[in-house]
Amino acid sequence: METAKILVVEDEVIVARTIASQLTQLGYTVIGTASSGKVAIAKALEAKPELVLMDVILKGEMDGIDTASYIREHLDIPVIFLTAYGDDNTLERAKITQPFGYIIKPFTSKDLRIAIEIGLLKHRLERDIRENHDKLATLLNSISDAVIATDDQGLVTFMNPAAEALTGWQQKDALSTDVSKIFHLVDEVTETKLENPVTKVLREQQVVYLKEFTSLITKDGKRVPIGDSASPIMGLPNQINGVVIVFWDLSERRKTELLEQALHKEQELNNLKSLFISTVSHEFRNPLSVIQTAVELIELQGENLTEVKKNTYLRRIKIAVESMKNLMEDVLFMGKAEADKLECKPAPLNLKEFCQELIEEFTSLTTSGHEILFNCSSEATDAFMDERLLNYMLVNLLSNAVKYSLHRKTIRFDLICDQHTNLATFKIQDEGIGIPDPDQARLFESFYRASNAQSIQGTGLGLVIVKRCVEAHQGTIILNSAEGNGTTFTITLPLEVVGDR
Ligand code: ATP
Ligand code: MG
């Protein structure tokens, strides 16, 4: 075992020698004795003892307390005072030098040994704590994550430079301030104030994490998207001593995300454009070739063309032209809707009459033999909507109901006008092929067609346009369908739509 090196400072030579021999007997190494403060400091500097035993009263300019204070401050060597009197004044002065112990004269070897061992242990522990503290401080000051610590009342006890930079608060101004003043959080989307994580940790006594899209409001009112976690600092079990919040700036990541989203959207638009061109040209090619064939047949047969055949060819041409016209209209409509130019120009109308007339006209144009059962028991059916867009929505839904329910010919059309909620509900229900579950979520995408509809003629644009018309009316559209059993589309619109200026 290594023996501790000790310097004895005592102006009475005999006493100094006695102490030195006591120490040697106890197994310590005495590196020397000194009778004045100056000599003590010189010896301490030269021999670097691990402990100094210091008489409080010394002759000369510096007394024991001045000397101890110098040694402690400049050399970091623990000092134990030897004193004959324990008067209050001397003790108070001695305390300032943070001594590692006092030995009251006269003392035994045992007293000496206990005081030295405790002093050495205290100094070692103090050094360890200081080193740990320094390491922790360096770590906290150099990490890029921001750290704020509070006590168990939520008052700030520490902020690292990253936290100062992010919040705009200086640690010196923030210390002992309620953390909610420094760490202000809002929801990025709803802009509502969020509960302070420290309050939550103090209440729940466990780690809490921020939800996504949280912003910190800095001292000068700027908004910074951040991620964070807050953890309790536990003392005794079940006793919370404080909270530490670790947070970091997500601005750059958010910027990258936005950029990626924009790129993705552009990519999607490009794909859609290509798909649009190829689908539309493909859809045009069918009726065009019908027309071409019919014209060639008319030319080929010349004078031999019978009246019946002529009418058949002309009907084919008419149907083909009609389908091209419809497609053209859809494309034009889509173009406008895509460019967000779908104007909504509401005007007064009576919904019940409007629907009845629409059904009449629709039935007169379709030859499928479907029966549309209209029902409206609402008394007041006056509304303020865009007739053209309304017509487009309902005709599209009716056309789909007819097209996708060829084997079951009943279609129900319900209209409800609720004057309390100020809402009109249009429900169009068929008993047709229905829509498979996996396809339902994608039906409002351009050109998307359900897997069970591939053999039926269609482009996959109708519902996209319907949705745009519904949105232009600030309404909603809901789909309910079961494959093989039928489909119901429900559109809800405000009875009085606010139009575009
Ligand atoms: P078009 O552009 O000519 O209307 P489409 O009818 O295929 O073509 P949408 O009206 O947008 O396009 O409908 C998209 C898809 O939704 C259809 O292809 C079909 O799969 C499904 N669908 C729509 N309405 C019904 C319905 N009433 N019953 C079953 N499936 C339907
Ligand atoms: Mg359709």
Image: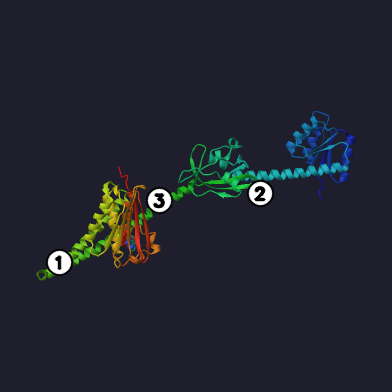
Of callouts 1 and 3, the N-terminal one: 3
Q: Quadrant of the C terminus?
A: top left
Position above or below: 273 against 65: below
Give the camera-side residue of 206 and 105: 206
Labels 2, 3: front one: 2
Name the kind of residue labelled 1 in the image: Asn
Question: Percent position (x, y) of residue 306?
Answer: 11, 70
Q: Secondary structure at mark 1?
A: helix
Q: Secondary structure at mark 2?
A: loop
Q: CA distance from mark 1 to mark 3?
A: 54 Å
Q: Secondary structure at mark 3?
A: helix
> In which quadrant of the rendered view does residue 310 lie?
bottom left
Position above or below: 438 against 195: below
Question: Percent position (x, y) of residue 127?
Answer: 72, 43
Disc 1 crowd rating (10 Å Cα; few below 14, some 14-19, many 20+) is few
Labels 2, 1: front one: 2
Question: Furthest-bottom residue in view?
Answer: 304
Mark 3 near ligand 1 (CB under 8 Å)?
Answer: no
Name the kind of residue labelled 2 in the image: Asn
Give the camera-side residue of 364 and 11: 364
Disc 3: which residue? 262
Q: Which mark is residue 238?
A: 2
Labels 1, 3: front one: 1
Residue at left 90%, top 35%?
Answer: 14
Disc 1: which residue? 311
Disc 2 crowd rating (10 Å Cα; few below 14, some 14-19, many 20+) is few
For residue 257, side relative to residue 71 (left or right): left
Residue at left 19%, top 67%?
Answer: 293
Of callouts 2 and 3, the N-terminal one: 2
Give the camera-side residue of 213 and 16: 213
Question: Percent position (x, y) of residue 189?
Answer: 45, 46
